[in-house]
Image (tube, grey):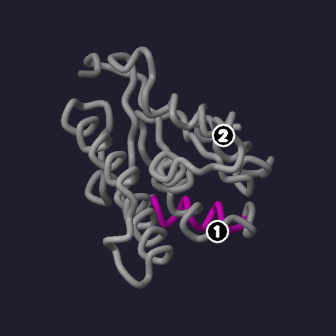
Amino acid sequence: MPQSNPHKFFIDSDTLIGFLKQDYKDEEIQKLINKRFNPNNVKDQQMVICTNVLGETLKNFLDANKTNINTLSDQIIKKITEIQEKINNGYIKIISLEDVKVNDVFKAYDELNIIDNRIGIADKWNLSVFVCLADIKTFYTISEDIIDSIDIRKYLENNGKKLSEIR
C-alpha cells in the first residue's frame, strides 16, 4: 500500500500497451516500462491512469484482434490481472473526468493544440488531463511525438509539470 503522500505519476496509453503486450521493439525500453510497473519502492509511489488511457488501450487490442477478442494472449490476460492487483493494493489509481474540471481540460487541450498540432488527439487529451491534476507532477511516456516536442516540454514546465521519457 502506498504511503499517505506518495510520489504520483501519470502514464499514457503507449506505456500501458507496452506493459501489456511485452513486445516493444527496444528491449531496454521494455525493461524500463516493466520497472515502472514493478518498482522496488512501490510504497513511495502511485501510478495514475486516466479512463481515456484504458479506453485507448482496449481499442488497440480490439483493432489488433478484430475477429475475436478471445485471441488475446494468456500473457496479456496475466498482465491485466497484475494491473488489477496493483489497483487493489493502491499502487495504481484510475481517474475519470469526475476527478478534473472538464473546462480546464478543454482549455489545456486548446493550448496544447496551438503549441504543437503534430501531437495526436488522444495524447493531447491525456496531457490535458495530466496538466489539470494538481497533485501529479510527472508524465511518463514512450511516445516520440511528445518526447521530441520542445514546446510541449516548455508548456508542461510552465505549468509546474515534468515530462519523463521512457527510453
**Looking at this view, is 127 or 165 the one in front?**
165
- Evaluate if marks 1 and 2 touch, with contact meaning CB atoms under 8 Å apart: no
Residue at 54% of width from left, 66% of height from top?
A: 122
Residue at 58% of width from left, 61% of height from top?
A: 123
* Label 1 sits on residue: 120
Relative vertical location of residue 43 with respect to residue 150 in this rendering, above or below: above
Q: Quadrant of the C terminus?
A: top right
Relative vertical location of residue 76 with respect to residue 32 in this rendering, above or below: below
Q: Quadrant of residue 48?
A: top left
Q: Quadrant of residue 113?
A: bottom right
The answer to which of marks 1 and 2 sits earlier in the sequence is 1
Q: Amino acid at mark 2?
A: Asn
Q: Is residue 122 left or right of residue 112?
A: left
- Residue density around tag 1, few if under 14, some if 14–19, many if 20 or more, within 10 Å: few
Residue at 40% of width from left, 33% of height from top?
A: 135
**Looking at this view, is 134 or 59 the one in front?**
59
Percent coordinates x, y for residue 114 in the rendering: 71, 67
**Marking on residue 158:** 2
The magenta segment is: 105-114
Residue 131 visible, this angle: no
Percent coordinates x, y for residue 76 in the rendering: 39, 53
Residue at 59% of width from left, 41% of height from top?
A: 159
Question: Mark 1: which secondary structure?
Answer: loop
Q: Quadrant of the N terminus?
A: top left
Percent coordinates x, y for residue 112 in the rendering: 65, 61
**Looking at this view, is 113 or 29 the one in front?**
29
Question: Mark 2: which secondary structure?
Answer: helix
Q: Amino acid at mark 1?
A: Gly
**Looking at this view, is 16 or 136 the one in front?**
16
| Dominant secondary-structure state across the stretch colored magenta | helix
Indicate whether residue 68 is drawn in magenta.
no
Q: CA distance from mark 1 to mark 2?
A: 21 Å
